[in-house]
Image (tube, rainbow, N blue to C red):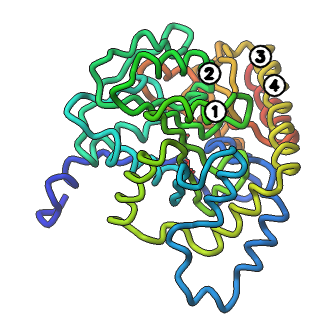
Amino acid sequence: MSRYWSRIVHELTPYVPGEQPRIDNLVKLNTNENPYGPSPRAVEAMKAALGDELRLYPDPDATELRKTIAGYYRLEPEQVFVGNGSDEVLAHTFQALLKHDRPLLFPDITYSFYPVYCGLYEIEYQQIPLGEDFSINVDDYPLENGGIIFPNPNAPTGKLLAIAEIRRLLESNTDSVVVVDEAYIDFGGRSAVGLIGDYPNLLVTQTVSKSRSLAGIRVGYAMGHPELIEALVRVKDSFNSYPLDRVALAGAKAAFEDVDYFRETCDRVIASRELLASELESLDFRVIPSAANFIFAAPLRMSAARLAEVLRERGIIVRYFNKPGIDEFLRITTGTEAQNQALLQELRELLL
Ligand SMILES: Cc1ncc(COP(=O)(O)O)c(C=O)c1O
């Protein structure tokens, strides 16, 4: 605390990211990174970007990358916005499209950055309880709102909402923006991008951090009606004209172009997630069916908090949220087959 701080800084409760410890041989299953490296073509493109041209500012409009993403999703470049990680894209979205007189709505169990942005931008919000089985019920979302946001699949539950339900929500909610945060969509869900032509109030956000294994370069994007995109550009150009550097622009573009590598690694993650889920069930975990690259599971033989602690002592870190409603669960990122086996080996020793 300091008397030099502005009022808003005194009142902030910042987001706490999953830890990135520097410990050798750690099995790191706590921040939903991809266990496989990025596309070799993306790495080559980034290396090629390391030269004399770095003395020049990057393209403020990220034209080439936006064209590439638009081409991938059969959209126009005017329907695509890019930013420094989807966290930044989301931050701009909260300020540009979700700050109104009526409260913003999001699930009570969801990405914990949402209330943080509300604090930063002084947005009133209301949290809508998930169902008993952690599902989002679109009928629970009242019409009086200044916007709706949820991840699909949801985080940290991994639970998917069907496209038909998203369409139903959009049909009944035409007066405010509905944001679908698809950080994990490539691991088993169908994107809502296909609905953009039908609903001018739909914004879909995605990231290269997870399915394209490029968390280290911080590239996220939003897709929607050009008027929604224009709002984001206006905020961006009032904040930082060059959120993506030359290396990140080159790497993200090449990653989008390497479709085979993307599909192959996503398939591998999905296959190991399914295997891990069934092994956890056989160790008496309550496993929530996941469409993401992580599993949300409650151990029935030991408290989740204790288990996270003991695993940590054994060099394996998973995410534990000390929050009512989910404090009996662990969120476990799907690792390589070898990492998953290492986890299961420890769990067998601890729980059987
Ligand atoms: C639901 C959700 N949305 C957005 C993000 C942010 O991703 P990034 O800023 O790496 O693009 C995350 C990161 O974990 C997430 O879980």
Residue in view at x 54 percent, y 33 percent: 320
Find the distance from the CA under tag 4 to the CA under tag 2: 22 Å
Give the mark nearest the N terminus, 1 or 4: 1
Give the mark nearest the N terminus, 4 or 3: 4
Give the mark nearest the N terminus, 4 or 2: 2
Give percent across and percent down for residue 322: 45, 29
Element at label 1? helix
Which residue corresponds to mark 4?
Answer: 274
Find the distance from the CA under tag 1 to the CA under tag 4: 27 Å
Find residue 283 and name its label.
Answer: 3
Give the mark nearest the N terminus, 2 or 3: 2
- Is residue 179 left or right of 33 when viewed as pictured? left
Determine whether 128 is above or below 33 in the image. above
Determine whether 144 is above or below 115 in the image. above
Question: Contact, CB < 8 Å: mark 2 with mark 3?
Answer: no
The amino acid on which the numbered mark 3 sits, given as a three-letter code, is: Leu
The amino acid on which the numbered mark 1 sits, given as a three-letter code, is: Gly
Question: Contact, CB < 8 Å: mark 4 with mark 3?
Answer: no
Residue in view at x 57 percent, y 20 percent: 303
Give the mark nearest the N terminus, 2 or 1: 2
The amino acid on which the numbered mark 2 sits, given as a three-letter code, is: Ile
The amino acid on which the numbered mark 4 sits, given as a three-letter code, is: Glu
